[in-house]
Amino acid sequence: MTSTAPAADQAAPLPPARSRFTRLLPEDPVLRRLSAITLVNTVGSGLGMTLGVVYFTRVMGFGVGTVGLVLTVAGACGVAAGVPAGRLSDRYGPKPVLVALLAVQAVCAAAYVLVDRLAVFALLACLVAVADRGGAAVRGALFAEVLPTDGRVAGRAYLRSVTNIGISVGTLGAAAVLQLDTRGVYLAALLVDAASYGAIAVLYAVLVPVAARTAEQAERAAGGPNPALRDRVFLLLTGLNGVVTLQFVMIEVAVPLWVVRDTDAPRWMVAGGLLVNTALVIVLQVRATRGTEEPRAAARVFRRGALLVAASCLVLGLAAGVPGWAAALLVAGGVACQALGEVYSQAGGWALSYGLAKDDAHGAYQGVFNTGMSGALMLGPVLMTSVVIAHGPFGWALLAALFAAAGWGMTALVRR
């Protein structure tokens, strides 16, 4: 007898098996699009970050001191850009503001290849820094708007892993450019970097859906003082996070100088340490976001990260005055410990920056939060060279105490 059971009663077909590669991709289509955009952006950034100073000195012919001064001034302009950019994103929406800032970056980065005067170079560098740091604040607000509330921190963690992959690829491309070392390839690389900004501006405009800004939202954002600047708890949170942000300057400035000048570890440990850091962040960043759903729990995760970074300082400080093999082991251990601290402190910081912000003012809050990070990145090199490196193991111990105090301070602040 032929079965007449309705189709609904029959077993549903199994979903197609996902390949090993597709299992690494996020299921959220918006996060998948943001990941593709981030990859394009950071490959270009990896080129620009690695080649910028070399191009300005070798091809443009400016002195090293002059370039350093210009980039310092540009960094200060970038610090000042976060708060107003965040306010603009609350008023007009993060997507149009971000697209406009990316367009500015694309034009100014491309204009570098035409520069032959110092004043023009300084102006372009300041505009690029303003667009870059302002864009970082606006991206934070955009993520808050397009990602689900319970997936914001995990989404940012995934995008950070993608960021590290993209920068690594871009850095490898920059290595090839440095090996060829001709004016033509430098110009081509900078134009690729500029094109990446233009490409992601278009991709953000086309691929990322956002809710339209209502007149009430725009009026509320435009009127009155910045709520984040009146929120004392959030300002203290921003300061403590800024202190722990110094770890990025530590790994990029203090560790290379320490390894080369003050230890007998092999010099290749400088590059090796950065590779270890990058690999661990790629693998562990998403996992580190677990347990950050509630502010007090997020503060404890942040503290764990800060204490791990503090421990890494103590380990690195021991690398002076010991045999080369022992110094290499201590440097490797210190860098690995810092990477673990980095993923936890970043996860906790993101969760708190969203969890303690007002829902209708994420732009303002992310603007303040990113300004704290930008300020730390600007001041960090001076601190690392004049305090940490200048005072040897004692300087590393002071830095460890600073990180530990910030970690414990965060839990005390959120507990109140």
Image (cartoon, grey):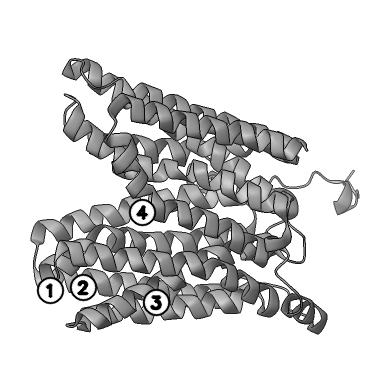
Q: Amino acid at mark 1?
A: Gly
Evaluate if marks 2 and 1 touch, with contact meaning CB atoms under 8 Å apart. Answer: yes
The numbered mark at residue 127 is 3
Left or right: where 209 falls relative to 33:
right
Evaluate if marks 3 and 2 touch, with contact meaning CB atoms under 8 Å apart. Answer: no
Find disc 4 in the rendering and name its residue: 167
Q: Amino acid at mark 2?
A: Ala
Residue nearest the viewer, comparing 171 with 64:
64
Q: Is disc 3 placed on a helix, strand or loop? A: helix
Q: Residue 240: give x, y in percent of width and height.
A: 58, 43
Q: Earlier in the sequence, mark 4 or mark 3?
A: 3
Find disc 2 in the rendering and name its residue: 188
Q: CA distance from mark 4 to mark 3?
A: 22 Å
Mark 2 neighbour class, 10 Å CA radius: few under 14, some 14 to 19, many 20 or more: some
Residue nearest the viewer, comparing 129 with 46:
129
Find disc 1 in the rendering and name its residue: 184
User: Residue drawn at (50%, 34%), measured in percent from left and top?
Assistant: 403
Q: CA distance from mark 1 to mark 3?
A: 25 Å
Q: Is disc 4 placed on a helix, strand or loop? A: helix
